[in-house]
Image: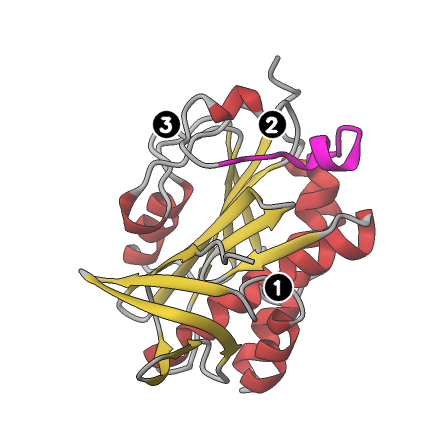
Amino acid sequence: MPSEPLDATWCADQLHTQIVARRLLYYPRISSTNDEALRLADGGEPEGVVVVADTQTAGRGRQGRRWQDEPGQCLLFSLLLRPAAEPRLLPILSLGAAAAVAEVLSSRYGIAIVTKWPNDLVIGGRKVGGLLLERRGEAVVVGLGLNVNGRPDSLQAHIDRPLTTLEAEYGAPLPREEVLVGIIEKMDDIYRQFQAGDNVGLIHRYRKFESLLGQAVCVTVDTRQICGRAEAISDLGALVVATAQGQREITAGEVELLVESE
């Protein structure tokens, strides 16, 4: 059963941020929070607005994949930002946003969440959320989809990879408003660090949660596959893979974990 609608007024009253969530726009139902944030960007909206919804009819992830949600059970929101950094540094912002989510869920709720480069949030090998960064001119939109409450099997029928929810891992439902406020405040901290140019510090925060390091992987980049062992996340946010031909730094791609024979 769907939960109660998100109490956006309570969230706005509780938030203590400097940039992110200067405006909080709530929609019970929307096609895509990222699309709405991009539309606002096209209209000249200043940075800091957060678009949040209880359900999306056309939510999407990387490479146009559909994001499936259970109405009233997930966190679905997008941040509109206008960073001063050059475009090649934007992957650092995306990884920093993932670190923000992981820091809140691990420190406040004791959830053993990890990241999977470049944009997945994972618990026990099962995806619980993901991020999508999109650029339009000088504007950047960072979207988050997070499975908070409900049973994983209600979503699993629509997705071909293992999924979970925070409720399933924590053992009880979590108040979405409390989780939202915590993540937005942490993302405000991350964004101010990014604007200050502390990219090395942001990557350090992200590396603490990255699950691929030391693993055998194959990364699909366009139509090519690069296979080897994931060794590091570079200071620019690339995945460093040791291959038979030497080290490769990969800035974007789809990662598959390889099962190594004993």
- Mark 2 or mark 3: whose residue is earlier in sequence: 3
- Kind of residue at badge 1: Ala
What x and y, as percent, mark residue 262? Answer: 56, 58
Label 1: element kind: helix
Asked if 159 appears above or below 39 in the picture, the reply is above
- The CA distance from mark 2 to mark 3 is 14 Å
Q: Check if residue 171 falls in the magenta segment.
A: yes
Q: In front: 25, or 188?
A: 188
The mark closer to the camera, 1 or 2, is 1
Q: Check if residue 9 falls in the magenta segment.
A: no
> At 71% across and 60% down in the image, what residue appears?
103
- Kind of residue at badge 2: Gln
- Kind of residue at badge 3: Thr
Q: In front: 15, or 59?
A: 59
The residue pinned by badge 2 equals 73
Asked if 202 appears above or below 67 in the picture, the reply is below
Give the residue at the far top of this rendering: 1
> At 59% across and 46% down in the image, what residue appears?
125
Q: Report the predominant secondary structure element of the magenta stretch.
A: loop
- The CA distance from mark 3 to mark 1 is 27 Å
What x and y, as percent, mark residue 76? Answer: 52, 40
**Quadrant, the N terminus:** top right
Picture quadrant where residue 212 is located: bottom right
Q: Are marks 2 and 3 in contact (CB under 8 Å)?
A: no
Q: Magenta region: which residues?
A: 162-176
- Mark 1 or mark 2: whose residue is earlier in sequence: 2
> At 80% across and 57% down in the image, what residue appears?
107
The label shown at residue 99 is 1
> At 53% across and 80% down in the image, what residue appears?
195
Label 2: element kind: loop
The residue pinned by badge 3 equals 57
